[in-house]
Amino acid sequence: MADVQRTPVIAGNWKMNKFIAEAAATTSELVPLVSGVSGVKIIVCPVFTALSATADAAKGSNVEVGAQNCYTKESGAYTGEISPHMIKDAGCQWTIIGHSERREYFKESNALLNEKCAFALANGLKVMFCIGETLEQREGGQMNDVLRTQLVEGLQGRTDEEFKSIVIAYEPVWAIGTGVTATVEQAQEAHAFVRGVVRDTFGDAVADAVRIQYGGSVKPDNAGELIQNPDVDGFLVGGAALQAESFAAIIKAGAAN
Ligand code: 13P
């Protein structure tokens, strides 16, 4: 494998939390805590209503802002949806696509997520593309098949150039919001598998360069050991990203590696 330096990407997914003022305040608190931190990409993802205020609070800092979802059309009669253009208009550069909560509660299919990812990239957003198995799938021995299908069906058609704007987030569903984190070994095993699928499907250059985040109960006290895995290139953090101080501690642990 080529010796490629992959800058970690550490993102906070605030999910359906924080009013506008709270999102802006947390961002304003985070910015000075991480202003001296280099060698890591930092992103926060608030709810749509708070995108603009969060982007304003992050302006001029090393904190970037992303949405949590994004539709496949520029504008028009799509009640309740939002386009990449609107997310960029709010001052953001990123979107999460395919979070397990969207797959589960909103029945988003691999085919739809493929379209969402393609459209977001084509319109200038960078994408954190989520995959992950449930406990049932893991215990039933289907984990590898599930991850391969989500990856291949979700990302097929993307070019090497587009992959420069894609980060893969491996989030085992059983570790999300449960306090149960994948062990260092489980995370490395899954990340190595995911990178192998990327290698088989998209080639060596993409596999060596693509960042794979781990998500699922990441905390300040486990981030340091998880990031030491050779195939863990950052985190997608839920609960522990809601407070600036604990998110900053995770960012520093990730950057220190
Ligand atoms: P927790 O960090 O709260 O487990 O959430 C992980 C997640 O779903 C981030 O997208």
Image (cartoon, helix red, strand yellow):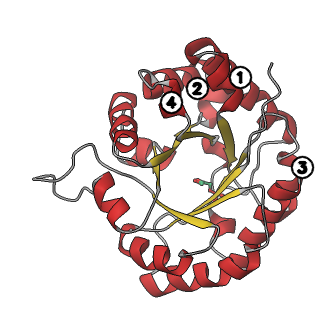
Secondary structure, mark 2, is: helix
Horizontal relation, residue 45 to residue 42: left or right: left
Badge 1 vs badge 2, beta-carbon distance below 8 Å: yes
Horizontal relation, residue 101 to residue 191: left or right: left
Q: Residue at x 79, y 67 (%)?
A: 37
Q: Is residue 227 visible?
A: yes
Which comes sooner in the sequence, label 3 or label 2?
Answer: 2
Task: Give x and y (percent) for residue 8.
Answer: 73, 48
Residue beneath disc 4: 161
Residue beneath disc 3: 225
Confirm if mark 3 falls within 8 A of ligand 1.
no
Q: Residue at x 59, y 36 (%)?
A: 132
Label 4 vs label 1, nearer the camera: 4
Badge 2 vs badge 4, beta-carbon distance below 8 Å: no
Q: Is residue 61 above or below residue 218?
A: below
Residue beneath disc 1: 193
Q: Quadrant of residue 4?
A: top right
Residue beneath disc 2: 147
Label 3 vs label 2, nearer the camera: 3
Task: Give x and y (percent) for residue 206.
Answer: 62, 25
Task: Give x and y (percent) for residue 53.
Answer: 43, 80
Which comes sooner in the sequence, label 1 or label 2?
Answer: 2
Nearer-the-camera pick, 178 or 65 = 65
Q: Amino acid at mark 2?
A: Leu
Badge 3 vs badge 2, beta-carbon distance below 8 Å: no
Mark 2 nearby-residue class (10 Å; few <14, some 14–19, many ≥20): many
Q: Amino acid at mark 1?
A: Phe
Which comes sooner in the sequence, label 3 or label 4?
Answer: 4
Q: Is residue 235 above or below residue 91?
A: above
